[in-house]
Image: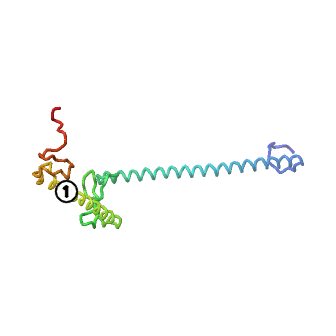
Amino acid sequence: MPVLARRKRVLPCILTEEEIASRQEELVRQTKARELREDSLKVWKAAKADEQKNYEADISHVARECFRLAGIIDTGQEPREVDCEEILSNSGVEVTTYRLDTGEVVSVRVATSDELQRRLEFEESKRAEGLGAEIDQATATALEQVCTCAGGPAAEEKDQDCPVHGVERNADGTDDEEDPDAEA
């Protein structure tokens, strides 16, 4: 019979013991390589997912900032920290908050019990200061009435010692203090 063609074909072949052992070693190497690649793929996917989350978070942050700025432009106002002062009303019932930069009223609210207590303490201290001033004025007025050396109503009593200043008078109505302008 004549040979029409020679070609190679892949057909099953029986392996020797050595070939089987060699294939087993190759299987172990390939299994380890596959596991490494699968682990790498998981890490890569996780990194990509984290990276994607980071990008999404960044985009979301920028979008919020754009929205905030658009609102500021739209209203013409921007929230800022401003110095304010809280004043208790004369009636002592309400606390009014004023902006110190414009003087505008920010809010009015009912005074707390602590604020009412502080008002009472403030009024008591002012009353004490006022009484002190009244006492000082009354004392000064009374002393003027008895001073014999300074032109008060008792000044005509030249022969008496001055009870206010402690100046002793001589019988002729002059005091014992030395006159600094007198020549020696």
- Residue farthest to the left? 156
Residue 71 versus residue 33: which sits nearer the camera? 71
Residue 17 pos. (x, y %): 90, 49
Residue shown at the point (64%, 52%) measured from the top left: 42
In the figure, 180 relative to 135: above or below?
Answer: above
- Mark 1 burial class by Cα count in 10 Å: few <14, some 14-19, many 20+: few
What colouring method underlies this structural image? rainbow
State left or right for residue 148 relative to residue 59: left
- Residue farthest to the top? 184
State left or right for residue 171 relative to residue 130: left
Residue shown at the point (16%, 55%) measured from the top left: 146
Residue 2 versus residue 26: which sits nearer the camera? 26
Residue 139 versus residue 71: which sits nearer the camera? 139
- Picture mark count: 1
The C terminus is located in which quarter? top left
- The residue wearing badge 1 is 137
- Residue farthest to the right? 17
Residue shown at the point (28%, 54%) measured from the top left: 99
Residue shown at the point (35%, 52%) measured from the top left: 81
Residue 9 pos. (x, y %): 79, 47
Residue type highlighted by circle 1: Gln
In the figure, 11 relative to 119: above or below?
Answer: above
Dot 1 falls on a residue whose secondary structure is helix
Residue 184 versus residue 61: which sits nearer the camera? 184
Residue 1 pos. (x, y %): 87, 45
User: Residue 121: which quarter of the image?
Assistant: bottom left
